[in-house]
Image (cartoon, rainbow, N blue to C red):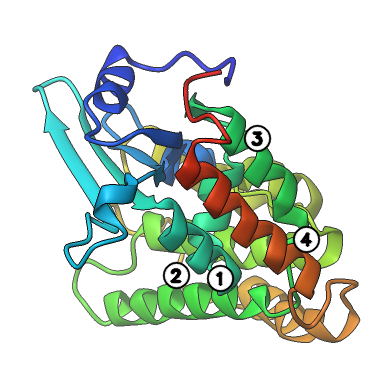
Amino acid sequence: MSDFTFPPQLTDAVQEHAYPLVFATVSGAHLYGFPSADSDWDLRGAHVLPLTEVLGLREGPGTWSLERDDGMMELDLVTHDARKFVGLLLKRNGYVLEQLLSPLVVHSSAAHAALVALAPAVLTRHHAGHYLGFTVNQWRLLEKEAATPQGPRVKPLLYAFRTVLTGLHLLRTGEVEANLGALNAGARLPFLEDLMALKRSGREAEPLPEPLEVYRAAHRKLLAELEAAPLSTRLPDAVPDAPQRAVSDWVVQVRLGALPVTAR
């Protein structure tokens, strides 16, 4: 479990889940290192459908969600069934990778620990594509906003830099780091600290303090580096057969109860 102190509503939401949970971790702005006081809490994870809901013709929910707003905070909990979750993991999906490896752990289990141990073996050079797509889309959003009277906002610019830096870090080190503050310790872009401070103070919807062009050169440089990173990374071109079999075995063990999903 994380040493982070979570609001009790998060634990309540986990306990209300309709199925046994492999894990539930915090994603979104809290994971990225720039939450504001009114930021929603995004909980993500994996659940386990019973055999009765996977063997017959009527399957249980591959994705299960819950939303809560008690007037003090908003949260949403979204989980995938174990088989669907690892299917996404093997398809180079950066979202589920970050969820699995998030250090902000609300619920964990032996099954969670076993899948975390398998995660390094499913990383490939093609994870760059996920982060390239995300950062390019965020920049396109910023350009659209630049044509409006309001102008481009702080939040999408932070997401544009967060994703390109996470992708670069992954391709260079084989490690997942989603916290923008930690990433910027290496990137050393002073304006990111200022923008994160604006976001944390609740001013995420405000226009950027400088014209978008001021940030474009830094983003283009990082984007070019991420585009080139697959050529020099030590990550393999594809997930080897042995890790794929291990992930498949993990699903079987979880489904049959050989790997516990009770809280650790």
In the displayed structure, would residue 116 be above or below residue 133? above
- Label pair 2/1, CB-CB below 8 angstroms: yes
First in residue order: circle 4 vs circle 3: 3
Q: Which residue is mark 1?
A: 214
Q: SS at mark 2?
A: loop
First in residue order: circle 4 vs circle 2: 4
CA neighbours of label 4 inside 10 A, class few (<14), some (14 to 19), many (20+): some
What is the CA distance from the residue labelled 1 to the residue labelled 3? Answer: 43 Å
What is the CA distance from the residue labelled 4 to the residue labelled 1? Answer: 39 Å
Q: Nearer the viewer, residue 101 or 49?
A: 49
Asked if residue 129 lies left or right of residue 54, the reply is right
The amino acid type, in three-letter code, at marker 1 is: Val
CA neighbours of label 2 inside 10 A, class few (<14), some (14 to 19), many (20+): few
- Label pair 4/2, CB-CB below 8 angstroms: no
Q: Residue at x 75, y 77 (%)?
A: 125
Q: Nearer the viewer, residue 70 or 141?
A: 70
Residue 22 position, x and y percent, is 47, 37
What is the CA distance from the residue labelled 2 to the residue labelled 1? Answer: 6 Å
Residue 222 position, x and y percent, is 70, 73
Residue 111 position, x and y percent, is 58, 36
Quadrant of res 173: bottom right
Q: Which residue is mark 2?
A: 211
Identify the disc placed on residue 121.
4
Q: Which residue is mark 3?
A: 113
Q: SS at mark 4?
A: helix
In the displayed structure, would residue 66 be above or below residue 61? above
Comparing labels 4 and 2, the label whose residue is closer to the camera: 4
Asked if residue 100 lies left or right of residue 159, the reply is right
